[in-house]
Amino acid sequence: MKEKALETLFSDVEETGLLTLYGKAIESQSDKPILEDPVAVAMTEELDPILAKSDSKLLRRLYERKIDPRLVVHVALRAQKYDDYARTFLSRYPDAAIVNIGCGLDPRFQRIDNGSVRFFDLDLPEMIRFKQALLEESDRYKMIAASVFDEKWMTEAKRCGANQWMFMAEGVFMYLQPDLIKKLVLDLQAEFPGSELVCEVVKKSWTRGMLQKIAAAKMKQRFNIGNSAGYQFGLDTPTEMESWHEGIKYLDAWSYFDSNHEKLGMMRMFRKSQYFKEFQYTVHYRLG
């Protein structure tokens, strides 16, 4: 019965959400895993019977666990780092609330739950409906079906009564319009003063012209993801967002190359290159 319900919802789910979920599951079952995610493994095993019947080449490759190893490592390193940000924040504020913006099918709450965090998964209705068929909500774990640009979700989240907030946008902001991202960040700063924001961005030069087209083509060719629009939002420097409001404070940045993990293989040779480190990276702010 549940498989049939999932199959009915399946057509509305973005394939990128499935791709990153399967990437976590594959890495979790590898030798010396970067990320241990038994919930992701269980979710993929539940989805496998549906993917096995799919006519989509990508979904068939997911079922067969044929994903580019570079993408698997990329997804796992990023998820591990965002989990670390969350755990560090919760070590200071155990009863805080965390909002996972554009959560997709990521089971982050299940990985970082400290027993007292209030956690919100936020995504578009079609993704949330699908996720609700796979994972159960609780008093401390809620899913909100809304666009991140619909401010009503902020009112809904605030009802939990938390005093400290962290917002995470993993693999999301760079695909959205710059003016909307700026408004969102300023709204978060106004509605949740003192909160923290962790988000992934790209170098602004990759959001326009030929570089934008090259990036979109490479994503499509290597991983069969991405779209013709390519990257939309980027920053010239990690501190650029500070100019949006005097209360925004840059805290730190992280690149995949900073990990120097052995599974990066030959890519480790670029870890000292500022150009490669700033192509796509994560920034961390306090919204004072």
Image (spheres, rainbow, N blue to C red):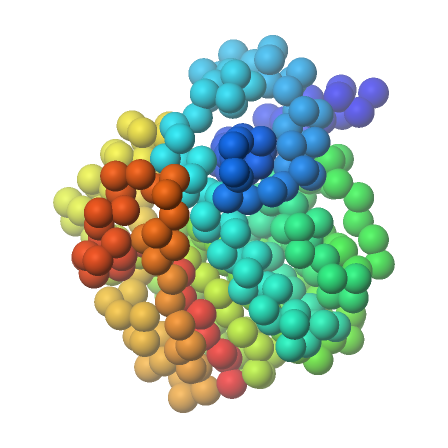
Q: Residue at x 52, y 16 (%)?
A: 64
Residue farthest toward the bottom in the current orientation of the protein: 246
Q: Is residue 36 left or right of residue 268?
A: right
Foreground residue, 257 or 100? Answer: 257
Q: Residue at x 60, y 13 (%)?
A: 52
Q: How many marks?
A: 0
Q: Dividing the image into 4 quarters, which one contains the N terminus?
A: top right
Point out residue 275 in the picture as x, y percentages from the top left corner.
Answer: 19, 57
Point out residue 97 in the picture as x, y percentages from the top left corner.
Answer: 69, 68
Up/down of 137 relative to 29, above or below: below
Q: Is residue 190 left or right of residue 49?
A: left
Question: Which image quarter: residue 180?
Answer: bottom left
For residue 145, say whether it is visible: no
Point out residue 132 in the picture as x, y percentages from the top left corner.
Answer: 74, 41
Q: Is residue 124 left or right of residue 143?
A: left
For residue 26, say whether it is visible: yes
Up/down of 90 relative to 27, above or below: below
Point out residue 74 in the picture as x, y percentages from the top left corner.
Answer: 41, 43
Up/down of 80 relative to 218, above or below: below
Q: Residue at x 15, y 45 (%)?
A: 210
Q: Residue at x 64, y 20 (%)?
A: 48
Residue farthest toward the left in the current orientation of the protein: 210
